[in-house]
Image (spheres, grey):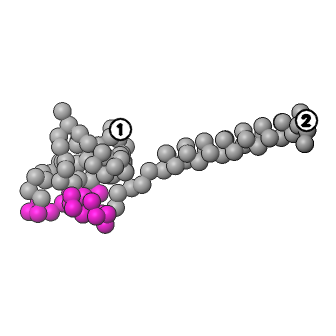
């Protein structure tokens, strides 16, 4: 089989399309992070609640009013965002108003 310029361009276009689709898929996956649910085993073990005001202070004595994920050193979201990634949960999204027992004051 002889390769002509036409075959070369068709194959090049096919490869470029495949690479473009792969890059787009990876970009979409990176943008859609998973949100931590209260039913997640790790979240349950750490007492995570997406609404920190509903935390049982008797069960979690290190909770204090006003403490939330947005004030935690492990929270990686930007100020004013409703959610951000958390290092404790493998960079899954947590609510900025949430709280868990791994909470540590930002410096």
Residue 43 inside the magenta-drawn segment: yes
Q: Is residue 46 left or right of residue 6?
A: left
Query: Which mark sits nearer the N-terminus, 1 or 2?
Result: 2
Residue at the spot 27% in from the left edge and 49% down from the top edge: 88
Q: Quadrant of residue 41?
A: bottom left
Residue at the spot 12% in from the left edge and 59% down from the top edge: 60
Q: Quadrant of the N terminus?
A: top right
Q: Which residue is most to the bottom?
A: 39
**Observer able to see residue 47:** yes
Residue at the spot 84% in from the left edge and 36% down from the top edge: 8
Q: Position of residue 71 (x, y in %)?
A: 23, 42
Residue 65 inside the magenta-drawn segment: no
Disc 1 crowd rating (10 Å Cα; few below 14, some 14-19, many 20+) is few
**On screen, 74 above or below 107?**
below
Q: Quadrant of the C terminus?
A: top left
Q: Nearer the viewer, mark 1 or mark 2?
A: 2
Residue at the spot 27% in from the left edge and 53% down from the top edge: 98
Q: Quadrant of residue 13?
A: top right
Separation (CA) of disc 1 from disc 2: 54 Å
**Observer able to see residue 6:** no
Q: Which mark is residue 55?
A: none
Q: Which mark is residue 4?
A: 2
Q: Quadrant of residue 11?
A: top right
Q: Nearer the viewer, residue 4 or 86?
A: 4
Residue bearing the label numbered 1 = 78
Q: Which residues are magenta?
A: 38-59
SS class, disc 2: loop
């Amino acid at each position: 089989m002889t390769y002509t310029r036409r075959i070369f361009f068709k194959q090049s276009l096919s490869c470029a399309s495949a690479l473009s689709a792969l890059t787009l898929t990876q970009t979409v996956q990176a943008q859609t992070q998973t949100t931590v649910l209260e039913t997640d085993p790790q979240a349950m073990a750490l007492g995570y609640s997406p609404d920190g005001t509903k935390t049982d202070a008797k069960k979690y004595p290190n909770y204090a009013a006003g403490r939330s994920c947005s004030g935690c050193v492990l929270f990686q979201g930007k100020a004013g965002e409703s959610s951000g990634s958390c290092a404790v949960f493998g960079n899954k999204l947590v609510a900025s108003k949430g709280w868990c027992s791994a909470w540590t004051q930002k410096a």
